[in-house]
Amino acid sequence: MRKKKKLVIDRIPERFNEGLFWGNGHMGALLYTEGTEVRFCMDHVKLWELRDSGRKEPKGKFQDFIKNPELFHNGTYFREDGEEILEAADPKTGGSQASFPYYRTKLPGLSLILDLGKEIRGFYGELDLEEAVSQVSLVLEDGSRAEFRLYLDSNVNIFRIDADLTEVEVRPEGWDFSRGNLSILQKWGYTAWEARREKGLIHVLQPFSENGLAVLSVRQDTNGVSVSLNALWGLEQGEELFSAEEGLLSPAGETPSPAECLVKKNQELLNRFAGDKDFFLQRHKESWAQFWTRSTICVPNDRLQQAYDVEMYKIFANERADSLPVTLQGIWNNDSRMPAWCGDWHNDLNVQACYWPVYKTNHGELGAAYIDYYAGIMSGLEERAYQLYGIPDAIHCPVMMAPGGHGAGGEWCFWNSLLGPELFVATDFIWYYEYTQDHERLVSAIYPFLEKTAHLYQGIAYMGGDGYFHIPFTNSPEIFKDGRMLIRDDATFVISALHYLLEHLVQYAGLLEKDTSDFIAFEKKLVPVTQTQAGYPLFPSEEVFESHRHFCHLYPIFPLGLDAHSECAQHSLNTVIDQGFTEYASWSFPYLAIFASRCGRGNMAETLLEIYCRVFRARNTFCVNGDPNDCGILRVAETNAGEPSDVFTLEAGFILPAALSEMFVHRCGKDVYIAYGIPEEWKEGSCQNMVIEGGHFISVELEDYQIKTVRIEAGSSETLRFHIGKGTGEEVKELTIEKGTAYHL
């Protein structure tokens, strides 16, 4: 296996997005420094504020929005009295707990502090991406050094620091309400954390939400510190979730308190770890080795190569089949400020893009948590659809989602009342099956979700004078005109995604021997996707008129894969380029690289990825919006730099490995394109076990600017056309492949 270059941090990480980081999909740790302190932000996927004071019923319904668009645009349907109460509250007393609205949001991480007692004057850290183990060396003010080895176990919630800490104060802490903007937690009625010392361990107990509790436990020994963080949340089930935790019932069968549950769980885990640290470390390394052997990409561009490796490391640090779906900041939320944008599940490209590389790089099992969780909250999403649209047996997803399918940042705010987020989710549900061929989840989760999403659009469609069904009040995230979001009928994004959903729903219904006539009839009468001389428009009556960072009007090209290398695709890309990139966000660049590959523009794809890596990454490679490095790429505006420069989201980086995969191989209908996004300057390169729709594994090797080998391992049986080598030397080979059989082209 190719040796991966280590991620090196050789300047003092004084900001949150400048230090080393580790994760196992449930628990995360991130290092930064303050004065004499080495601080570790310790995050957990279940740290959520789950309350919301917003009204349980929307102030208006979808039919009202259509009749009164001005009221929709000016927020009349969404404004809450609680917002005025919050502004008018006494800043000294904070008002009563009941006076403040609760907005469902991801919560900050807790803190582990190593106070060295001396100012930190120098820093050198290495993250071994292959083993997920780090070495850190600090230079202190008196010239002495402090050395650490660190890793977060891949299989259990243990963070280990090997070091001589005999003269170091080790201090775990809950939330400090005086730091950053955490005072809001105190106003919400949060109580301070409590420390307990039991059997040589320190336990920090931090209550949150209504029934939630996090326990950060520390065990110190002669060779270092072991840390465990676990959390229980309440949702609406309250104590039932506590008693359901595996192995937490007392011998008498009684349900212990939440605090007893977590203290016992951490204590037993830390004791087991202390008994055989080498065993745990070996299993940790084996877990990461197994991850890396599933696929690989090698490119003759050092910056992009390391970016690919780092982003794949982040993916496995955040995404596990037995955890929750990845959120905006994943398991690396700051311990000194509230998460940006509620740290939620953003049901547009922001969360969905985090799974594109999972499917493409042969890690489809990591997408199971996403499928299972959304399928598990279908009843809540059905309730939303009925409340907002009056349509039974349908699904509506909020743009900003908190656990349980609730809206984050307010249940019925403007964003959470928009049509369309469920199509982003449905597209990823289809991707999961197309890439994994997971029949069990097709039956239990995917088909039911797609069916209920189709019901929503069947229920709101209207028959136009042209004899076609049209979808009213749609948007193309996030395009604005005259200071408000542009809303029209039949957005290209909505219509193309709906056709895609219906076509696959009919296909899957056939596999499951279900009646398809209703969906066939609806899809046949659904208005076609509009194409113009400029390519795909935003809406049938609205061409792209400004720099558009989401490119959702190009949805037929990607991620739907309905079009590639056509005149329409080329014209669409040219139109995007003509509008310029001044209004882009950081993730627009790797996303646009995918479209460049699907138009055969490899040089453009490489340049866009280079721009992202050079301009929009902090020292530790976390994505940063705006133009933090003063590269002059963007016109910094509220839309692309509305948060401080230490704020990040994951999807921009995660798109990069998906884009590199697209450069080597992508599929459009029955056509598979090999090396159509490869830049002219790449003399060599390779990909191993990239996956395309149908569950087919593709490996490609380039040598001396030529395609040397192409290997296909069929994941299903079908006939495909393989386009090998763009330009005048292109070969087209039609091949009928059988599942489980390998082919060489």
Image: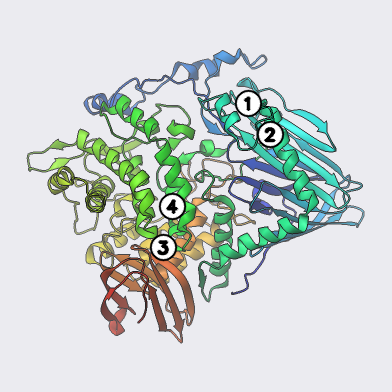
- Give the quadrant of the C terminus: bottom left
Q: Earlier in the sequence, mark 3 or mark 4?
A: 4
Place of residue 484 in the rendered image (x, y in percent of width and height, measured from the top left): 34, 35
Disc 4 marks a residue whose amino acid type is Ala
- Taking the image as shown, residue 423 lies to the left or right of residue 322, namely left
Between 626 and 204, the residue placed more toward the observer is: 204
Disc 3 to disc 1, how far (Cα)?
41 Å
Helix, strand or loop at mark 1: helix
Labels 3, 4: front one: 4
The residue tagged 4 is 353
Numbered mark located on residue 185 in the image: 1
Q: Could you classify mark 4 by the number of other residues whose Cα lies within 10 Å: few (under 14), some (14-19), or many (20 or more)?
A: many
Residue 619 at what x, y percent from top left? 64, 56
> How far apart are the two marked residues, 4 and 1, measured between alpha carbons?
31 Å
> Does the CB distance between marks 4 and 1 fall below 8 Å?
no
Instruction: First in sequence, mark 3 or 2: give its number.
Output: 2
